[in-house]
Image (tube, grey):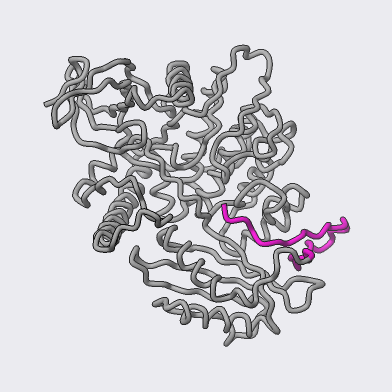
Amino acid sequence: MRVLNDQYAVMQTLGSGLQGKVKLGVDLKTNEHVALKLIKSSKLTQKAILNLYREIQAMKLVQHPNVMRLLAVAKDVEYPKKKGGSEKVVLVVLELATGGELFDFMMFTGHFSEEIARTYFRQLVSGLHACHVQGVYHRDIKPENLLLDKDFQLRIADFGLSAISEDLSVADDLTTQCGTRAYMSPEIIAGTPYEGSPADVWSAGVVLFILLAGFPPFQIATRQDWWFRACAMQQYQAFWAAHSRTAVFSPMAMDLLTRIFDVNPATRITLQEIWQHPWMHEPVLSDAAMTKELMARKEKVTQEKVRAQKAKEAKAAASAQTTFNPFDRNTHRSISMPPSASSLHSADMFLPTIQSCGIPAYTTLRCFASSAADLLQRLHASFDTAGLKYVWTDSLATPSENVKAKAQISTSSGRVDVMLRLHPVEYADGLFLVEVRRRGGDLFAFRHVFDLVSADLQDILADDAAPPAKVALPPAAAGDDDEVEELISDEALMI
């Protein structure tokens, strides 16, 4: 048995990255299971050292039930290798989040009820407030960085991109463009100096939206994104009308999110104001009810992970039989053995591994067709041309302005459920916006299906250089005399 610093017994690997590994450990003094983050000293660049320093300092400053606990740090620790010899590592000892990532529950089990979403959002806001009081701004809030303990209580983790204020009496102007694009506030993406607190509020709002809906509010906070542009132009009625086609939001939830998605950080709702909002004080789940609900969801998460792991192993075995071509740009030159399905239970006892696929839950296409019915039939035919195995249902048999279809596609990663909706574009006869949403299944499989279908539609796709047209928006509520500025449509960015 390998022991580090005469205190921590090293067990199986929970995750790995370019700079080191995360191991399950046992504190021999307390007999407590911990996470051992082992960072190879030889792999530490100046940027990695800075990120590590910020992470350690931030976690030392903040002590809160909803923030991951830092237990110990030691540098120049001799780590004995299994095959002999040793190497120097930085040892970071963290509490063990056995519940896993919030990301996994959202990806494999779908959206949460308002009670569960509110329970977790209250914990997130409480943890963020504790950080901001100490001058710590996370700057990378996303479901992958929100972990769950054994009782499924939320922990904010991964402070590697955080900023720490030296003077709490003055708001610091930050300039580093960092974070994950789908969760980054518009002021960060714009590259302008920004304050850390409003930026964290925006990211937390994106997380809340996904908790309630199961998909993101926008793909990127720039005016190239139709959904964000609606918020930027304060056309929240159009924003919510569009999203309410595929998700249910209570009036109070919409009001809170509308105030969070204020593109002006100076007028954006603050954490203190969020806590006072009426939606935050509606019912939440008890600890016992939360544990029962999440335990049931965790079983499904484990099953889906096993299925995905088997598909990954089968794909790896198939690719191993092909001839290696060193000039193939798609060839992976850094190969590591994937974990076996039997190790997934241990992997659930999580410490951050990066899982960022960059694939949104939906995207759009602009297509020319003589009618919505003809376009839907062409979309249907593209599934056959692509050689997909699927079950298709659509609304053509029922006269309706809402032309849509559902497809259940069988892939090597399991079933992928896709929703397609067609929206006519005003002042551009024969042009339609096709909304393609992943309703369930593997993100990578969804992207593969989308690529196959869109490749078959090249002859009817609108030229990106064509003048933009105006999308037909839902009518304003009766009695609303305000002039409504119409939104400009374009193909949504694939991040």
Placement of 272 over or under 110, stated as above or below? above
Relative depth, front residue between 363 and 278: 363
- The x, y position of residue 302, in whole percent, is 28, 52
Q: Nearer the viewer, residue 398 or 464?
A: 464
Q: Dividing the picture into quarters, in which one does residue 327 lie? A: bottom left
- Residue 480 drawn at (x, y percent): 84, 58
Q: Quadrant of residue 60?
A: top left
Q: Which residue corresponds to the image point at 39% horizontal and 49% vertical from the top-left?
A: 105
**Camera-side residue of 438 and 338:** 338
Q: Quadrant of residue 417?
A: bottom left
Q: Residue at x 54, y 17 (%)?
A: 134
Q: Which span is picked out in magenta?
A: 467-495
Q: Is 341 located above or below residue 34 in the figure?
A: below
On screen, residue 191 versus residue 361, left or right, reads right
Location of the N terminus (image quadrant): top left
| Residue 206, x across and y down, in percent | 57, 44
- Residue, far bottom: 397
Residue 153: image location, x then y, percent? 39, 35
